[in-house]
Amino acid sequence: DDEAFVVALCRLLTAFGIATESFSSAEEFLASIPANRFSCLVLDVHLPGLSGLELLNCLDRENVRVPVILMTADTSGLAGNRGSRLPVLGCLQKPLEGTVLVNLLRQVLRGEDPPLRTPEPAFPVSLHP
C-alpha cells in the first residue's frame, strides 16, 4: 500500500485513543519485534518484499503470538492460505470503513472475542495497549 494510507490509518486510530506504530515493510517489522510487544497486528496481504501472508508464517515459526487483522483490496488468492497458527481475527476489504476497524480493535484490546472471523491481509501497523 502507499505511505499516505498508513499515515491516515495511524491518525484515525490515534484519534480514537489507540496507540500505533507503523513499519515500511514486513522485514522492518520482523527486525523490531521483541516477543509479545504488540497487542494486535493490522496487516495488508500485499506488501513490498515479504507478503503479509509470508510475514504471518515467519511470526508463526518464531513463536510470536499476536492477534492479526488482515486488510486487502484484492481478496483473490486468499482462499486456502491459512497455514499460520496465529489468531487471524478477520480480513477487512479495502476501502474499509474506519469505524469497523476501530470497533474491532477496541474489542481486541479489551480482551473480548471479536465477532469477525473471516479468510485472510498496507504496511503492517502494530498496536500497543
Image (cartoon, rainbow, N blue to C red):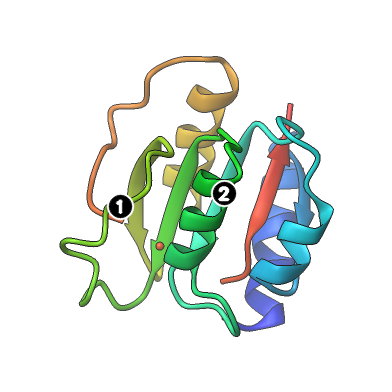
Query: Residue 128 at x, y = what percent?
Result: 75, 34
Count neighbours of disc 2 (C-alpha within 10 A) and say few if under 14, some if 14 to 19, many if 20 or more: some
Amino acid type of disc 2?
Leu
Q: Nearer the viewer, residue 64 or 119?
A: 64
Q: Residue furthest front?
A: 61
Q: Quadrant of the C terminus?
A: top right
Q: Which residue in the structure is indicated by mark 1?
A: 83
Query: Residue 67 at x, y = what percent?
Result: 50, 35
Question: Sequence-wise, which precedes: disc 1 or disc 2?
Answer: 2
Amino acid type of disc 1?
Gly
Which residue appears at 64% of the width and 60% of the height? Answer: 9
Mark 2, secondary structure of its residue: helix
Q: Which residue in the structure is indicated by mark 2?
A: 59
Q: Nearer the viewer, residue 25 or 63?
A: 63
Query: Residue 91 at x, y = what percent?
Result: 33, 53
Q: Quadrant of the N terminus?
A: bottom right
Quarter location, residue 115: top left
Q: Is residue 127 above or below residue 9?
A: above
Q: Nearer the viewer, residue 91 or 48?
A: 48
Q: Is residue 115 above or below residue 77?
A: above
Mark 1, secondary structure of its residue: loop
